[in-house]
Image (cartoon, rainbow, N blue to C red):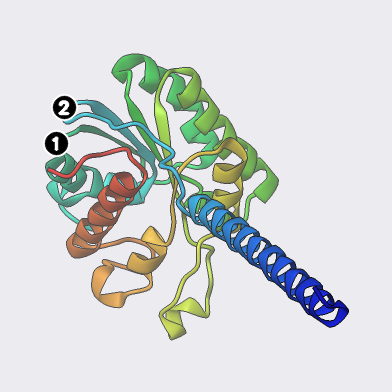
Amino acid sequence: MTLQRRVALTARRRALTLLQRRHVLTRGVALWGALALGGLAACGRRKPLGRVVAAGSTVLALGDSLTFGTGAAPETSYPAVLARLSGWQVVNAGVPGDTSAQALERLPALLQEHKPALVLVSIGGNDLLRRLPEADTRGNLQRICELAQVAGAQVLVLAVPRPSVASAFIGSLSDHPMYAEVSTALKLPLHAQGWSTVLADESLRADQIHANARGYAQMARSVYDAALAQGLAQAR
């Protein structure tokens, strides 16, 4: 074999080796990328926070006048409509004018009497309207959720709007952030923008702070949809 031919053969072998290495490296990078994307996709799929509450189970709706159904007939309150949608036995524990401290005070007796599988917590609106210390309201809200959990119940937090004079003119309300903060701290499901959406719509209100029958029906449907999304209910 001539020297020129040997040099050409050696150059060809080096070129082939380089191509093989590039192919292996490219496949490795592609595989790593696929695995990384798969991991990100898995992280993006949030697992439901709850367990299914079977039809016929007792559910406690804790709250104030919005839970009670002020502004409409009793059978159109959101707990009453929710009971028909879900098949749950929903106890309406809404007391008009109640603050978070008052709801916390009466909760132990309610838990002992009804032994609910799920507690819907919608309280604090009167605290905000009366400008009570937000730290106290947040503490009461967290304690309410914790007591319900200790009693063996699951909890769904229903956010309450932040009072706003401007909202009457622009038709928009936003949830007070403490509800998201408490639900995140305790790793509880949160129903966001439920009351805010209803009370921002004049056609769904009986007055400035209460829903009408249509508003309560919409709230009940949104609570049920949230329960379905969070794994607390099954479609009927």
Q: Nearer the viewer, residue 174 or 75?
A: 174
Mark 2 and mark 1 in contact? Answer it, CB < 8 Å. yes
Residue 6: image x %, image y %? 82, 74
Residue 204: image x %, image y %? 25, 69
Q: Nearer the viewer, residue 16 or 137?
A: 16
Dot 2 falls on a residue whose secondary structure is: loop
The quadrant in which residue 20 appears is bottom right
Q: Residue at x 48, y 61 (%)?
A: 161
Dot 1 falls on a residue whose secondary structure is: loop
**Quadrant of the image containing the N terminus:** bottom right
Residue 118 in sight from this viewpoint: yes
Q: Residue at x 38, y 72 (%)?
A: 200
Q: Earlier in the sequence, mark 2 or mark 1?
A: 2
Q: Residue at x 27, y 52 (%)?
A: 225
Mark 1 — residue?
Answer: 87
Where is 78 relative to 152, above or below?
below
Residue 18: image x %, image y %? 74, 69
Residue 70 in sight from this viewpoint: no
Where is 24 relative to 168, above or below?
above
**Quadrant of the image containing the C terminus:** top left
Disc 2 packing (10 Å; few <14; some 14–19; many ≥20): few
